[in-house]
Amino acid sequence: MLFALDVTKQQGWTILAVTGELELATAPQLRQRVVGLVGDGDTRIVLDLSGVDFADSVGLGVVVAALKRVRGRGGDLVVAGAVPRVRDLFEITRLDEIIDLFPSVGDALAAGVGDAGTPMGRSNG
Amino acid sequence: MGEVRLEIPARADYLGLARQVVAAAAAVEPTFRDERIDDLRIAVSEATTNAIEAHADLDRDERIVIRCNLGDDCIEVEVMDRGSGFDPDEVEAMPDAEDPARLQHEHGLGLPLLRVLADEAEITSGEGGTAVRLVVYRSPHLAP
């Protein structure tokens, strides 16, 4: 199946949209793209998973690695638009306790203050 | 239904095929609920990913075998590799979410997920390889 990554910028955040299945065959592409973005100084990332119809633990693992990388540079990463099945996985593994999940990119940006120097607020307390 | 048997090369690009075949086998039974097939796809993905990684140091001709049997109320899937095996009881526990060390663990979610999503999960591992047996019932209330 097609796997694609698309990068846009909005309100000081980098929107990284993922399309396809996020697992062993595709996760390295996401990892590499995040490494590139962070290397370019893009450390405030909204990971748009609305186009991901399947993910497993390898996919979740690369999201954890991305979060670690951006936070290591003083940035942050949030997840937006995950379909219920993918969102369930974040909850089962309790990753939702360390990564903010938003229904959509719009919700994620609305929760932020729009100031490129200020971290986005948490959605789940 | 008879046994469905799939042999795949230990390559990541065959992982999706394994999921598709097992999900299609379950869908032969029309009362298999969609969310249970979703659970099955993830559990099979976890077991097959482990098998592919276990073959990293083996000859490329060594295959991973995936066998499934559809019963009246459940599907049984077995994923067998020829890797060097591991002790499933020795798998490192994940730190709590609030522990800063949690971010150091991008691996290790597979077996816990597999055990949550499958109604039965049994791992037999030795020097000759590992067999992961999964059972998923067509409806959660049918699980023992």
Image (cartoon, coloured by chain):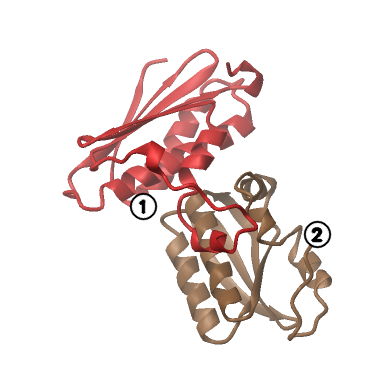
Q: Left or right: B101 with respect to B90?
A: right
Q: Position of residue B95 (x, y in %)?
A: 55, 53
Label the brown chain with its letter. Answer: A
* Residue at x 54%, y 62% (from the top left corner): B101
- Determine crowd level at label 1: few under 14, some 14-19, many 20+ residues with C-alpha closer than 10 A: some
Instruction: Write down the colour of chain B.
Output: red
- Give the label, 2 or 1, closer to the camera: 2
* Residue marked by disc 1: B12
From the image, which quarter does the N terminus of chain B lie in? top left
Q: Classify B118 as above or below A93.
A: above
Q: Amino acid at mark 1?
A: Ala
* Residue marked by disc 2: A125
Dot 1 falls on a residue whose secondary structure is: helix
Say which of B112 and A55 sits in front. Answer: B112
Q: Amino acid at mark 2?
A: Gly
Q: Position of residue A64 (x, y in %)?
A: 55, 62
* Residue at x 29%, y 47% (from the top left corner): B54
Cα–Cα gap, marks 2 and 1? 37 Å
Q: Classify B14 as above or below A50.
A: above
- Determine crowd level at label 2: few under 14, some 14-19, many 20+ residues with C-alpha closer than 10 A: few
